[in-house]
Image (cartoon, rainbow, N blue to C red):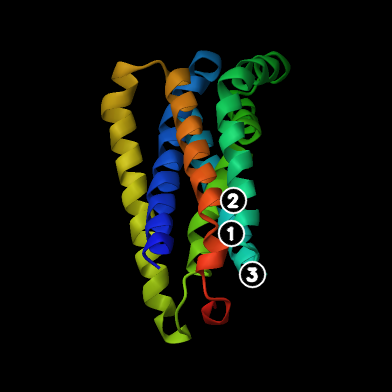
Amino acid sequence: MFIVYGTFLILLVSYGAAIMALEILSSHLMAPFFGGSIYIWGSIISSFLVHFSVGYVLGGYLSKRNSSFTHFSLFLLCASLWILAIPKIYIPICEYLTETIDDIRLGSLLAMNLIFFVPVTIMASVAPFIIGSIPGSHQKRGFTAGLVLFISTVGSFLGTNVTAFYLIDLFPVSRIIMGIGLYCLFITVIVLLLRIDRRLVPKERF
């Protein structure tokens, strides 16, 4: 089970960090088109909160249906590929919205959801899916959920600070996003190769 728990740990930290890194970087993508006012940050924060909420429900639903880790990893694969596409798609999306919508609040809100809804929602589903996949008894469910969310939050803390304090000063935003996408893709492929489903004991899942 060492490989299983190690994989869970890496997934939680990696995708927790990736989500918050994208949230920090999204402000730099929006600024040239919508500015950097409080309206933009309102759009960013509210959009990501919606993505988190939908992702939590999605992860819980997939876990409840006992979806295999292989199938779940295919969702993560799609999220990784979407992140890799962001540097290519965000400019035409933002240009179209600024030309057709005068209200920067509505325009930035639509841009955030069109660009980030799919990858962030999928990545947010990692924690609840893992909570439902960890072998154990019903009595340990509360502690398991707390520990999983703690680890994911540590990843979010790292992603926020490393991106905001270091990466932005060293690399162009598009290159950082590409790096995040490649890293997530690498992690997902490793998970697929490890065949986690074969290492879990079905009768102990809850």
Residue 181 position, x and y percent, is 51, 32
Q: Residue at x 64, y 21 (%)?
A: 89
The quarter of the displayed image where residue 106 is located: top right
Q: Amino acid at mark 3?
A: Asn
The quarter of the displayed image where residue 141 is located: bottom left
Q: Residue at x 61, y 55 (%)?
A: 70
Q: Which residue is disc 3 drawn over? A: 66
Q: Amino acid at mark 1?
A: Phe
Q: Secondary structure at mark 1?
A: helix
Q: Residue at x 52, y 48 (%)?
A: 49
In the picture shown, does residue 86 fall above or below 18?
Answer: above
Q: Which residue is disc 2 drawn over? A: 73
Query: Viewer-proximal residue, 181 or 173?
Result: 181
Q: Earlier in the sequence, mark 2 or mark 3?
A: 3
Query: Is disc 2 in contact with disc 1, using a CB cutoff of under 8 Å?
Result: yes
In the picture shown, does residue 116 fall above or below 5?
Answer: above
Q: Amino acid at mark 2?
A: Ser
Q: Residue at x 55, y 15 (%)?
A: 33
Q: Which residue is disc 1 drawn over? A: 69
Query: Viewer-proximal residue, 5 or 177?
Result: 5
Q: Secondary structure at mark 3?
A: loop
